[in-house]
Amino acid sequence: MDESEARPLLARGLGRRRLIRLDAGVAAAYTLLLLMITGDRSAPALLPVAVIAATGLPLAVRRIWPVPAFAAVLTASVLSLFLDLAWDSCAAAAYALYPVALTRPRRRWIPTPLIGVLSAFVILGGAVVGPTGWQAQRSAALLLGLAVLGASWTLGRAVRERRAHAARAARQIADRAVTDERLRIARELHDVVAHSMSLIAVKAGVAVHVAEARPEEALDALRVIETTSRGSLAEMRHLLGVLRADTAPETAQEAARAPAPDLSALTGLAERAAMAGVRVALDVRAGELPESVALSAYRIVQEAVTNVVKHAAPAHCRVLVHADGHRLRIEVTDDGPGVRVLPGGVAPGEGHGLIGMRERVMMYGGDFTAGPRPQGGFAVSAAFPYDPI
């Protein structure tokens, strides 16, 4: 069964055509009701029928032509009062006024709150006095009708403001979601590009220095550059493919199905780092992690190892990733010189890697530290909680 069919009618909401048909039914029923309760009047026979029809039938088009429908109903309703016909206290006019209040642009000179307060007082006063006192004079009946119109106008404007507020809140949520997604993509791209370009830069430098003396070693460096660049391009396609609105459906589906890096990819990361002169010892005891947690852990380790390659190669690096089912701990240490680009003392355009790692950890409400070790080298430590699968 289709999900929309399984939901109740009111939960699905009514379309515009159904609402117009509903208004047509209300208009017909209301007109018949007025004709039934209209007794013998002194006015000509055709005039009461025409006035009553003008009071009820325009309600059928109140959503299509709100202002003309309201004007017609209000005019007929006032005529009913002065012709001593069935008087509905402007109930039909109020029904026609509601879509006008709901759809017309806001006018600052219309004191809607004051109209609502005065209408409430008049309606309450009419309820206290009773129908006899109010129907005794046409002026009192007209005042009551104006109060009913004021209440309808206030209700329509209140619903309009509520919808406008909900729309603004939805736009703000959407804007925040877009901003968060941009930051996430920026972090992902930074991690991919920084890691790959660091390896490429290191191996390109090696190739330049040994090209003449040891051409075989230069050729190996070029192979590493080729492999690394192809891998980074594939990852960037995965990140950007699902963002392009004009992407072919098959391509977008392939990009969405492509698995995101997780802890199983750390072995390949270590192998690439070894090509750049950084020997990485892995100690991974994490078990099965949620996909987002595994991706964050991989990116943190990737950025930390990339920093070792950029600033400490050749060096030895130890990567520890432990998880107990509720908290993940990551430590990346090396025996390099211990000098890194740190927030607060960075050169222009640098330092985004450590900031990105800190943001990933803070997103989970965890702890992050990075700095030189007393015994030499550099250490990155991160720990954050997660919900088990």
Image: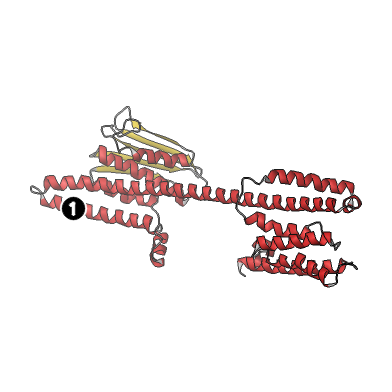
Residue at 67 percent across and 62 percent down: it is: 68
Task: Identify which residue, 134 or 244, lies in the foreground.
Answer: 134
* Secondary element at image label 1: helix
**Is 7 rendered above or below residue 227?**
below
Residue at 63 percent across and 45 percent down: it is: 109
Q: Residue furthest top?
A: 374
Amino acid at circle 1: Leu
Residue at 84 percent across and 50 percent down: it is: 140
Q: Is residue 261 visible?
A: yes
Q: Which residue is mark 1?
A: 222
Q: Residue furthest bottom?
A: 46
- In the image, taking residue 87 as reference, residue 3 lies left or right, namely left
Find residue 29 and report its horizontal and vertical position in percent: 79, 68
Q: Residues within 10 Å of mark 1 (few under 14, many from 20)?
A: some
- In the image, taking residue 145 as reference, residue 370 lies left or right, namely left
Q: Is residue 388 visible?
A: no
**Is 23 rendered above or below residue 140?**
below
Q: Quadrant of residue 309?
A: top left
Task: Identify which residue, 190 or 88, lies in the foreground.
Answer: 88
**Is 142 rendered above or below residue 68?**
above
- In the image, taking residue 33 as reference, residue 163 lies left or right, namely left
